Image: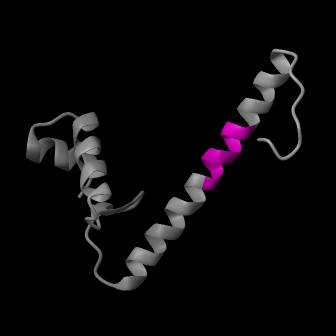
Amino acid sequence: VTLRELVAMTGMNERLVRLKIQQERKAGKLILSNNRDGYFLPECPEDVRRFARSMSRRAAEIAGVARAAETALADMTGQECLEGWM
């Protein structure tokens, strides 16, 4: 189900729908998603594996961008960046 479909079905805005999905996921519900299908429930263990790999890759990308921003901030403020600390 796409985000737009969920908005239409629930009458909630996109932000609230995403928040509700996040809350359900944190509570242990397996609500998967991808760019092609939107949100869906797993049909097999491979669906869950694929989703977990995708989320792990996204987390690593976000962490890399955060580290780059921290390094840039340290450069902007004249702080020395010690290897292994960021």
User: Is 6 situated above or below 75?
Assistant: below
Considering the whole magenta stretch, tell me its main secondary structure.
helix
Q: Is 12 left, or right, of 28 in this rendering?
A: left
Please state the horizontal and vertical placement of residue 40, each as a whole percent of the image. 27, 65
Residue 13 percent location from the top left of the image:
20, 33
Q: How is the image coloured?
A: one colour
Toward the viewer: 19 or 4? Answer: 19
**Viewport quadrant of the C terminus:** top right
Residue furthest to the top: 77
User: Where in the figure is residue 52, as x and y percent of width and height?
Assistant: 47, 68
Q: Which region of the structure is painted magenta?
A: 60-67
Q: Quadrant of the N terminus?
A: bottom left
Q: Is residue 6 above or below residue 33?
A: above
Query: Within the image, what quadrant is residue 79 found in?
Result: top right
Residue 56, image quadrant: bottom right
Left of 34 or right of it: where is 3? left
Q: Residue at x 66, y 38 (%)?
A: 66
Q: Residue at x 24, y 55 (%)?
A: 24
